[in-house]
Image (cartoon, helix red, strand yellow):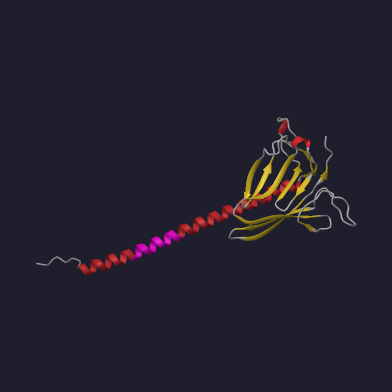
Amino acid sequence: MKANKGFTLVELLIALAVFAILATITTSTLYYAFRTRTHVNEEADRLNKIQLAISIIQQDTKQALERPIRGNEMRLFAAFIGQDHYAEFTRDGNVNPDSLEQRSNLLRVAILCQNNNLVRRTWNSLDPIDRNTFEDKILVDRLTDCHFNYLNQNLQTLNEWRENAVTRNQRKESLPTALQVNLVLENWGEINLLFIIAGTHYVAK
């Protein structure tokens, strides 16, 4: 008669130890795999947002016009306002199919640095009664630095844009030749974007 064979206590402890080690390795591998995948997805989403922001600003600057506006208490605002952290101008191409809405095809937009974000600002009307009523959309977030420069017809880089400011041998310019957007992205570093401003003369009606 054969005796029943089983596992000894030592064998069971060894098996449990091996299982625990394999479980730990598998769990760690899965954790880092999911973490890497999440990180890659986040970075891809961030890149898509930056590409969209570039496209939006490019469309704005390509359609910039030499058209000043009037705001609070009929105050006159220049066609282009350029400061270190703020750029504002008038652009064409505000789509209005079949003229269903009683508004201009022109739009006043601003690009600004605010709370570590690059923001696009728009107003409901071209010549708003109250300029404090606007809509902001964050284009790029998680910035550690954000500022603008402006290029004139001689390709000089300026920290601000003053309408029709001239130096020797220059003609008056209402619009800069280009807007330079300088960003430092968290964990990504510095990026400098240059947007050509193809302004045309517009006679206000």
Q: Residue reaching furthest front?
A: 73
Q: Main secondary structure of the magenta part?
A: helix
The residue at 38%/64% (across/down) is 25
Front-most of residues 169 and 92: 169
Residue 166 is left or right of residue 10, and the answer is right
Front-most of residues 43 and 4: 43
The residue at 81%/55% (across/down) is 152
Placement of the N terminus among the 4 image quadrants: bottom left
Q: How many marks?
A: 0
In this rendering, the answer to whether 159 lies above or below 96 is below
Q: Residue reaching furthest right?
A: 169
Is residue 40 part of the magenta span, yes or no?
A: no
Is residue 28 part of the magenta span, yes or no?
A: yes
In this rendering, the answer to whether 155 lies above or below 197 is below
Q: Which residues are magenta?
A: 21-32
Residue 8 is left or right of residue 195, and the answer is left
Q: Quadrant of residue 93?
A: top right
Q: Quadrant of residue 91?
A: top right
The residue at 50%/55% (across/down) is 38
In this rendering, the answer to whether 20 lies above or below 96 is below
| Residue 139, horizontal then vertical, whole percent | 63, 49
The residue at 71%/45% (across/down) is 110
| Residue 22, horizontal then vertical, whole percent | 35, 64
Placement of the C terminus among the 4 image quadrants: top right
| Residue 28, horizontal then vertical, whole percent | 41, 62
